[in-house]
Amino acid sequence: MAAHYVVRHVDRADPAVIEALAAAGVATVHEAAGRVGLLGPRVQARQDGATIAGSAITVSCHPGDNLMIHAAVEVCAAGDVLVVTTTSPSTDGMFGDLLATSLAARGVLGLVIDAGVRDLASLRAMGFPVWSAAVHAQGTVKASPGSVNVPVVAAGQLVRPGDIVVADDDGVVVLPAPAGEAVAEAAAKRISNEEAKRATLASGTLGVDLYGLRPLLRDLGVEYVDRLPDR
């Protein structure tokens, strides 16, 4: 029989670093990290305008069984993000407003799940943000063992316990905790650079000129003409 664990201890990143990454947002963090760490697009925000960043508490569940999500609540702390996966693909509604209430009582910021959620209207009303692969009312059981705080793969991305999770309307990105400070610094530089570009573009400058793209277009054989030539 395979071993199953609930690991109580997780090494978490500096809260100031996590806060800086939250302010930067998913797209900027992904770029600043070298375009790594992004979960696949099937895991989507199920509300508008929510942004969270925190330390990953990971859960590996049997499909259609949310027993290990209940087990994970005990080891969560304020500022954590619960990341749930299943051992084979599942769209069942493994998480709803009762589990969200339990997590919110412990200060958990939100849920990322490569499976389904339900009670979506209630989750939105209570302000508990979720990112999921599906919304599905199909119920689950509590019968099968799994593990908490082991490495998991969510939407094609490896997530380790204590990884920094950033999630917003653009999706979800994860980073190893030791990389957080350097990525936060790189993200701050990108934001400053983009603010300058935004001002330049707002003044009427074209992107092809700002980025020096005219020579590239020419070298690629792109021609500017007033009309298409007669055929």
Image: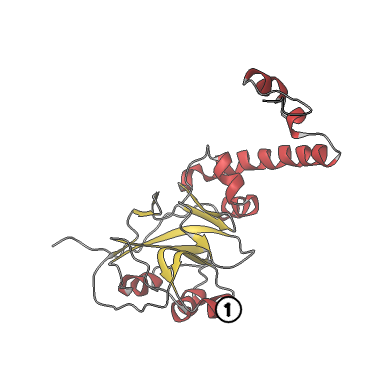
Question: Can you say whether 93 is above or below 148 in the image?
Answer: below
Q: What residue type is labelled 1?
A: Met
Name the quarter where the C terminus is drawn.
top right
* Nearer to me, 209 or 192: 209
Q: Is mark 1 on a helix, strand or loop?
A: helix
92 displayed left or right of 15: left
Question: Can you say whether 52 is above or below 186 in the image?
Answer: below
Q: Position of residue 217 (x, y in %)?
A: 67, 24
**Which quadrant holds residue 229?**
top right
84 displayed left or right of 2: right
- For the point 34% across and 65% down, the residue is 90
Count of marks, rendered view? 1
32 displayed left or right of 106: right
Q: Residues within 10 Å of mark 1 (few under 14, many from 20)?
A: few
* Residue denoted by label 1: 126
Furthest-right residue in this view: 203
- For the point 29% across and 78% down, the residue is 141
* Nearer to me, 76 or 28: 28
Furthest-front residue in this view: 231
- For the point 35% across and 60% down, the residue is 149
Name the quarter where the N terminus is drawn.
bottom left
**Which quadrant holds residue 138?**
bottom left
Question: Can you say whether 211 is above or below 113 in the image?
Answer: above
Q: Where is residue 18 in the image (x, y as percent from the top left)?
A: 57, 53
* Nearer to me, 20 or 61: 61
Q: Where is residue 170 in the image (x, y as percent from the top left)?
A: 58, 54
- For the point 82% across and 34% down, the residue is 205
